[in-house]
Image (cartoon, rainbow, N blue to C red):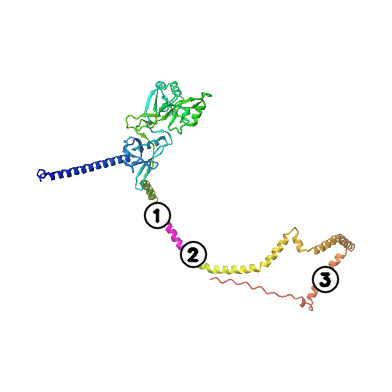
Amino acid sequence: MPLQDLTPQLRTRLSRVERVVGLFVGLATLLLAAGFVYYIYHTAQRKGWFLTKAAYFIFVDSAAGLKVGDPVKLMGFDVGKITRIDAQPPGEYFNVYVEFELRDPYYGYIWTDGSRAKITPADFLGKRSLEVTKGTNGVPSYLFFDMTELSVRAALATRDIQTRVFAEHVPGTNGAALTDVFQPVTLPVLQKLADAEVQRIRVADYFHNVRSIQIEEALRWESYPNMVYIDDVADPNNPQKPLVSVGRPVAKGFLEKLAAAGHKTVRIAERRPPNKIIAGIWQDQSGRYDFYTNKVQKYWLLSDESPALTDRADAVLKQVDEGLPGILQLTNQLATVLSNTVSLTARLDTVLSNALPVVTNVNGLVTNVDAIVADLQPTILHLQSITALLTNSQGALGDWLIPTNLNAQLQTTLTNVNAGLPLTLSNVANLTSNLNAQLQANSNLVSNVNSLVVETDDLLAGLKRHWLLRSAFKEKKTNAPPPPRKPPPRR
């Protein structure tokens, strides 16, 4: 039904419904847009779209396990992501170029000394992860303070030049550096550079809000956040040694020294907060920060690469494959050893069965030996007593064989024999001399005795032949030896 055909009451009611529906649709659209904007903002905040990012690159041997978008870790935190992976040209020394970025404030951990990139295995499927380490020394890889290059003469004429620090190492003629990075720029250092004929220097705005303060008032402050001295304050007693130097943090102890030395005021400054825009990038070859003008420069970070777990497993399997023939040969040898062991066990069972009677006999023998030892126990005790007596002192054997009373009698007898022995020898000598004298006096005695012996022998021979006494001297007949055997007849 056309709208103009409706009654005025219906048209009024329908227009109200249309306004309500339009308001609802508009409100829903606003809520949807707000939700979408909140989602975009939350996603951007979560992914760090609003944060400053610093770009780095490394070279690796292989891109296996790495892909664009993988997170970069620092001390276990996700601090960035990989943005590019590409192969190097054929003639280049390195193989793969990997570029990644770190979010604010994590790029502040990357310094020239101690910071490295590590490619480590992430899982057992060949995945690898990129991790950077915290720097320990050196200077930051990127500079976030406004940097200026000016001549030494202009620096000498610049007011409040102490608010700046050097952004380079200025080498001297003898090899030693005339300045260090982040060293405050002072007039004595600038004069030294002018004497060394250094033309231009690079400095960074490191301090700001320079002002003079009353020392008495500053002593009542509770803290001095980010405050440093901006001037060298000399000691009245020792002008060569300043009480405070440029860049030294403000502390109550130094303020008390200044007050004791008679100083009323002192100039201080505050450390400038870093910018959100990169101002310089460190160059290791030149030893200074270069201006970050083209916004495409990246810092080269050295890397340590570990092979993926799949590559390690492949190497292990290769070694196993090479050693498998030896293992099979060893298995065959083990089978032979086991077979020999089974045969030896069977034979050992037989040997043990045969040895059982021997063991029984040995057991009986041991029992008999125990009985014999028990019977010999008194004898052993007596022998131990005798041995104790024999080993008691010198002459114990003689004391045991010859008692004390027998020893005294034997001693007396030997004394008497020793006394009578010369007299006996004298009597024997007299007897032999008398016998010799008788023999000399009776010279026919020996011949008569000889004749008597011969005649006696003849008498005995005659008695043997007499018929009456012949049987008394008859000789016993012995068995005659058997006749020799005749040799066997020849065939």
Query: Which element type, helix, strand or loop, lies under badge 2?
Result: helix
The answer to whether any part of residue 164 appears in the image is no
Q: Is residue 322 above or below residue 426?
A: above
Three-letter residue code for mark 2: Leu
Quadrant housing residue 172 = top left
Q: Quadrant of residue 224?
A: top left
Q: Is residue 64 left or right of residue 20?
A: right
Amino acid at pointer 3: Thr
Between disc 2 and disc 3, whose residue precedes? 2
Q: Label 1: how many residues lie within 10 Å, few (<14), some (14-19) or many (20+)?
A: few
The residue identified by callout 1 is: 328
Mark 3 = which residue? 456
List the residue tagged with mark 2: 348
Stretch in magenta: 331-347
Residue 23's image quarter? top left
Q: CA distance from mark 3 to mark 1?
A: 111 Å
Q: Are marks 1 and 2 in contact (CB under 8 Å)?
A: no
- Closer to the camera in the image, 264 or 459: 264
- Residue 48 location, x and y as percent? 33, 38
Secondary structure category for the residue under label 3: helix
N-terminal of the pair, mark 3 or mark 1, is 1
Residues marked 3 and 1 touching at CB (< 8 Å): no
Contact, mark 2 vs mark 3 (Cβ under 8 Å): no
* Distance of label 1 from label 2 (alpha carbons): 29 Å
Q: Where does residue 232 sit, x and y in percent of width and height?
A: 47, 25
The answer to whether residue 190 is seen in the rendering is yes
Q: Which residue extends farthest front?
A: 9
Left or right, residue 374 beside residue 185: right
- Residue type at numbered disc 1: Leu
